[in-house]
Image: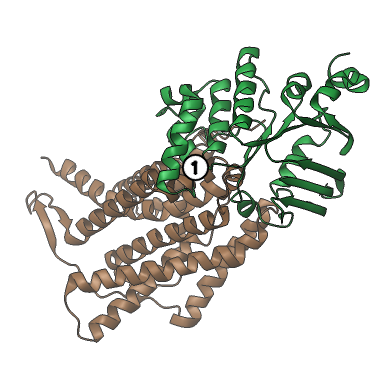
Chain colours: A brown, B green
Amino acid sequence: MTEASLYFLQQIINGLTIGSTYALIAIGYTMVYGIIGMINFAHGEIYMIGSYVAFIVITGLLGMGMVALPVVLFIALVVAMVVASSYGWAIERVAYRPLRGSNRLIALISAIGMSIFLQNYVVLAQGSRDVAMPPLVSGSLVEFGSLETFQVTISWMQLLIWVVTLISMTVLTLFISRSRMGRACRACAEDIGMTNLLGIDTNRIIAMTFVIGAALAAVAGLLLGLYYGVVNPFIGFIAGLKAFTAAVLGGIGSIPGAMLGGLILGVTEALTAAYFPSEYKDVVAFSLLVLILLFRPTGILGKPEVEKV
Amino acid sequence: MLELKNVNTHYGQIQALHDVSITVNQGEIVTLIGANGAGKTTLMMTVCGSPQASSGEILFEGETIAQMPTSLIMRKGLAVVPEGRRIFPGLTVAENLHMGAYFSDKSTYEAQLQHVLGLFPRLQERYHQRGGTMSGGEQQMLAIGRALMSHPRLLLLDEPSLGLAPIIIQQIFEIIEKLRDEGVTIFLVEQNAHQALKIADRGYVLENGRVVMSDTGEALLTHDAVRKAYLGG
């Protein structure tokens, strides 16, 4: 292979890695929107909290002398998911449920308020500086190409991100398509009032979508924390916006859409950073958002909202 | 079985129901007729707790349900086929029916499923098809089937004949009578007054949110004022 094509391949690999994590976060936006038609702008902060919890658990376990890598990662993942889910559940309970039935704009403002609150709460509790995530997963799995031209690398960390994302998405897809609660979730997305008329407590279904979305954001929090090696209280804002863009790109409300949108956005960003000054990658990502909203507001896999008569 | 005493319902400042009192006895078909906007659907939805009655009493099998949340009321043994059917278009027929039996155990579910598919063989043919791809008549069958999946003792039907071909309407009304014969109590809201009164044991006439008349189905069919207003002379 030529140097140029090897370089290109490397960007695709990097893009799919970041894209997977965008997809994980985007699921939370899309599921909540699918059911109650609101954008949960505090969702990015849930990802940030997941990242912090993972950091605290990992440094804690390492400090206690635990070194078995899979065990440390597994415990950090589970604790981050549980804590983030509790936050997701609590946010819905405190900031959104009391406003249900009022104007959409009011819930949106509440979401933005929640986002600011959570960010500052973490600044107070943890400080506003970067904290360094211990480099648990290092080294590379595959290297090919030659040193003189360009060497393509797939690191263990990238592989870990792909595998964990793939498992999470598979579990989610099976849950939504096969389980009783997953079916209720889809029914709610189609007609929440009717689902309620069948005796189902739709508030519980809504709470469940917040919990699932938060758990997946926490997975992304752990993975990205390890990948970048740093965590700070402000990472939620930009990651949230990116994931939101991914969700809109794929078609907000559609779960496969969020997965696809995340991957496309990740690859687009990686390619932009590779061939243009890397500062342009956010410009391109958000230009993409504007273009989708202008020319295909329903996204790639989204269905147009039909006015019911 | 179902009793409404002096029920008032408001949408914000607007009062939609005024002192409505209605009784539905075990094993009856009771119909509620009235013009567009008379409050028929509001009355039915008030029974389901959405919207909730602002005053008055609603008793189901002797229990007060007026202030309960909808999800709780709908688990008491009544089921609704709402106006416009409201099936889940993206879910398959099988999944739609499953949603109707969300709280049933497996054996009740199986038994009800066989019962429903027996009543509507069409649903068996369309079993794995998405609800939204079916015709209006089939969707109405699915909506009734879904409501029956919870094995209700009282079935609320809101304009099941709306927008359907006469032959399908005939079938739907035959099914309603059959259900009554099986012991399901039926409360039927209809604009198609003629057909509804023919199968009803008793009927109520609703005008501007008030019950203005009540009698047996037969008596209402031959009543002058009713004939003029609702049966085309």
Q: Percent position (x, y) of residue A136?
A: 21, 71
**In which quadrant of the rendered image does the C terminus of chain B lie?**
top right
Instruction: Give the SS element for disc 1.
Output: helix
Closer-to-camera residue (B146/B60): B60
> In the image, is A211 to the left or to the right of B73?
left
Closer-to-camera residue (B117/B14): B117
**In which quadrant of the rendered image does the N terminus of chain B lie?**
top right
Q: Percent position (x, y) of residue B206?
A: 85, 34
The correct choice, above or below, for B102 with respect to A111 in the image is above
Closer-to-camera residue (A275/B90): B90
> Does residue B180 show up?
yes
Dot 1, crowdedness within 10 Å: few (<14), some or many (≥20)? many
- The residue positioned 92% from the left and 19% from the top of the image is B224
Closer-to-camera residue (B184/A228): B184
Residue that lies at the very extreme toward the right in this rendered image: B225
- The residue positioned 58% from the left and 49% from the top of the image is A199
Q: Percent position (x, y) of residue B53?
A: 79, 51
**Residue holding disc 1:** B99
> In the image, is A284 to the left or to the right of B214?
left
Q: Percent position (x, y) of residue A141?
A: 12, 58
The correct choice, above or below, for B224 with respect to A94 in the image is above
Residue that lies at the very extreme toward the bottom in this rendered image: A64
> In the image, is B75 to the left or to the right of A6?
right
> In the image, is A176 to the left or to the right of A121?
left
Please, which chain is the residue tagged with disc 1 on? B
> Does residue A299 show up?
no
Residue type at numbered disc 1? Met
- The residue positioned 17% from the left and 79% from the top of the image is A67
